[in-house]
Image (cartoon, rainbow, N blue to C red):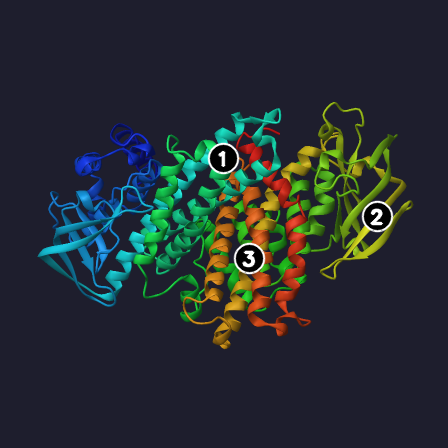
């Protein structure tokens, strides 16, 4: 189905459920013999939901499953999908549930007519049997699970091990989608509650403890959605990596759905604790679906087992046909060992970093990913993408002629003069002043954390030129000028990552108006336009972390005792990190595409920054824990990665500030 067709189908499912299962609270009301659930099943047959398996329309089936999760409806639609795939001639009067033999934990058994029993281990036969007896097992799930006793066998379908594995992967993905949708529904209720519920004289969403919790839930929801969409894309393409992509989505959702549900309940507080509210029934749905994953174990194991035992990497992401052709070209070039500044410049790749050679945004992202994966110095790319892009969009013709050739040749060593002692991430509050004096500007003040300023030949500086501006960010201007020069001094500081950053002092430093980039007092536009470049930088960070993951996996493969056996805590930790990293990569791509399409990316960009930088921290910590003291010796990529990760978290606007941006995008009050 096309994206539009899936959206229309989901809307139709939403409408039908609005009539037949209008609220999660109906799960608490007596449903004699499953009459209400049976009516939903009748509608599913009448509207063609149960035919999706024969059509292979996984995207539509999961869209409908998400709608079921939103209203906590236990209709086993993915069971019907799998049954239709395995038994194409299945009569529409049959209402199947699918279980691994024996059927101990079955959903919607009260309205099922048949059970399709998958062999537990290897191939054999999937047996379609009538349901002879249902034994309810009351507990967390509402309606209750049941153990099913099969009756006479009506069909047996030969299945090999691969078919059984595929069926379980599909069922697991369906459970993850439904659980995540139920958690998201509670999250949406919590966000609205945070806007209207007042405490201590203000909406509770104004308290950072609440707004950041909501932001964290939104990140989990977006990451899960991206992972699921990527799994569906690979499934539709028939890609060999689709099972791993699906299990990464499942692994993330299994944790995230519960985190989101609990976070939403914390925000809802007492109002969400009582069964008059929808929260308790969505809570039951989330946990019931996540727990049933244990009934569908995969022979391939969890994602960490696949990554270690099959010596594979994370499933590849795509940025479009043209960008992927360029990736192939660039990879061939780099595999020849050509990663020096001179070779990259000679090949025209640095020019591409700011859009030269008509490079698309997607091709620029490929450039960042491939170079950073191979360890190319990030400052080289920063000059090309940040400064080059700004000069292309805001520079004069003279500035383009002067600077773009230097950037394309890799000969513009610069430092970024944004940060100041009193402003942190609040760039609109900067105080370094530039005062007009004829054809010059006179700059006074000091800047902090100018990485590599001691080696720089150029300074990219944001200064206040409109001290009386009603809105602070409207009084900022950007300059690009050579250093050193009279009145400019620096003091070096060694960072945790052994980098040199500098405090730079401006005491009557004179720069020409020809060094001004963009309009007077229009610097905020120049700065914010660089957000597109920051997407590239974030893509580079995730590519660097991806390389770290691959190196960790390679070392663990050489010393398998350190990762432990299947089911170990170490492997579970690796699975979680792999899923989070894949989510970060996907969020970067979503952010990039939104920017490229002119749609903005108010949510995706800060989400990608948070997930990517925090997984960098956690992956480095995990590597040290798993590999032991040897991983902390000089030259180790992991101990250096850990030290650098702090910079990723606090640089470019701390993650706390990014969470504030997400909260504002959700409509929560300041």
Q: Earlier in the sequence, mark 1 or mark 2?
A: 1
Which quarter of the figure has residue 621? bottom right
How crowded pointer 3 is (Cα within 10 Å; few <14, some 14-19, many 20+) is rated as many
Q: Which residue is mark 3?
A: 543
Asked if disc 1 and disc 2 are in contact, CB closer than 8 Å, the reply is no
Q: Earlier in the sequence, mark 3 or mark 2?
A: 2
Q: Is 140 on the left or on the right of 515, as rendered? A: left
x and y percentages locating residue 49 in the rendered image: 22, 40
Q: Is residue 94 above or below residue 553?
A: above
Q: Which residue is mark 2?
A: 504
Q: Which mark is residue 269?
A: 1
Describe the element under mark 3 as helix, strand or loop: helix
Q: Which mark is residue 247?
A: none
Of the pair 520 and 439, the residue shown nearer to us = 520
Measuring 28% from the left and 57% from the top, which residue is drawn there? 168
Mark pair 1, 3: CA separation: 40 Å
Of the pair 214 and 638, the residue shown nearer to us = 214
Q: How many marks?
A: 3
Closest to the camera, between mark 1 and mark 3, is: 1
């Amino acid at each position: 189905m096309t994206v539009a067709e899936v959206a229309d189908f989901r809307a139709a499912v939403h409408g039908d459920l609005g009539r037949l299962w209008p609220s999660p609270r109906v799960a608490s009301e007596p449903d004699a013999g499953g009459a209400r659930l049976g009516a939903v099943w009748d509608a599913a047959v009448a509207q063609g939901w149960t035919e999706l398996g024969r059509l292979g329309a996984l995207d539509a089936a999961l869209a409908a499953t998400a709608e079921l999760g939103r209203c906590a409806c236990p209709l086993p639609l993915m069971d019907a999908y799998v049954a239709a795939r395995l038994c194409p001639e299945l009569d529409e009067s049959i209402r199947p549930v699918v279980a691994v033999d024996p059927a101990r934990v079955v959903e919607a058994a009260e309205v099922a007519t048949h059970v399709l029993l998958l062999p537990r281990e290897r191939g054999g036969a999937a047996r379609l049997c009538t349901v002879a007896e249902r034994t309810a097992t009351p507990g967390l799930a509402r309606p209750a699970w049941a153990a099913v006793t099969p009756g006479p066998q009506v069909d047996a379908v030969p299945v090999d091990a691969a078919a059984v594995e595929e069926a379980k992967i599909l069922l697991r993905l369906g459970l993850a989608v439904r659980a995540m949708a139920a958690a998201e529904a509670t999250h949406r209720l919590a966000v609205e509650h945070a806007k209207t519920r007042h405490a201590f004289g203000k909406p509770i969403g104004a308290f950072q403890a609440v707004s950041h919790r909501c932001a964290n839930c939104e990140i989990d929801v977006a990451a899960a959605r991206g992972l699921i969409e990527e799994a569906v894309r690979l499934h539709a393409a028939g890609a060999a990596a689709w099972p791993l992509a699906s299990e990464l989505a499942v692994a993330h959702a299994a944790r995230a759905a519960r985190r989101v549900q609990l976070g939403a309940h914390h925000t809802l507080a007492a109002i969400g604790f009582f069964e008059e509210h929808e929260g308790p029934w969505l809570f039951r749905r989330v946990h019931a679906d996540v727990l049933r994953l244990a009934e569908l174990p995969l022979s391939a194991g969890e994602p960490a087992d696949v990554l270690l035992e099959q010596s594979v990497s994370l499933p590849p992401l795509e940025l479009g046909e043209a960008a992927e052709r360029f990736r192939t070209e660039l990879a061939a070039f780099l595999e020849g060992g050509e990663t020096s500044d001179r070779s990259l410049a000679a090949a025209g790749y640095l020019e591409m970093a700011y859009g030269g050679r008509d490079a698309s945004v997607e091709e620029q992202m490929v450039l960042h990913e491939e170079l950073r994966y191979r360890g190319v110095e990030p400052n080289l790319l920063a000059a090309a993408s940040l400064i080059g892009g700004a000069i292309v969009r805001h520079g004069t013709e003279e500035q383009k002629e002067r600077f773009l050739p230097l950037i394309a040749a890799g000969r513009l060593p610069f430092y970024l003069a944004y940060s100041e002692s009193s402003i942190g991430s609040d760039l609109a509050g900067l105080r370094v002043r530039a005062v007009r004096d004829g054809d010059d500007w006179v700059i006074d003040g000091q800047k902090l954390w100018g990485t590599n300023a001691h080696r720089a030949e150029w300074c990219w500086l944001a200064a206040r030129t409109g001290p009386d501006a009603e809105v602070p960010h409207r009084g900022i201007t950007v300059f690009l000028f050579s250093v050193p020069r009279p009145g400019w001094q620096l003091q070096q500081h060694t960072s945790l990552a052994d980098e040199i950053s500098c405090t730079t002092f401006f005491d009557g430093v004179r720069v020409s108006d020809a060094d001004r980039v963009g309009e007077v007092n229009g610097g905020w536009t120049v700065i914010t336009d660089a957000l597109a470049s920051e997407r590239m930088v974030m893509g580079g960070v995730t590519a660097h972390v991806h390389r770290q993951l691959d190196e960790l996996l390679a070392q663990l493969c050489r010393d398998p005792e350190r990762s432990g056996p299947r089911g170990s805590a170490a492997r579970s930790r690796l699975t979680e990190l792999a899923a989070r990293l894949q989510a970060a990569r996907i969020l970067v791509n979503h952010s990039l595409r939104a920017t490229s399409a002119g749609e903005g990316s108010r949510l995706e960009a800060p989400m990608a920054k948070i997930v990517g930088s925090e997984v960098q921290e956690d992956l480095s910590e995990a590597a040290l824990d798993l590999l032991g003291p040897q991983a902390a010796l000089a030259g180790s990529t992991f101990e250096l990665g850990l030290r650098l990760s702090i910079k990723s978290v606090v640089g470019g606007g701390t993650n706390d500030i990014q969470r504030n941006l997400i909260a504002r995008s959700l409509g929560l009050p300041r």
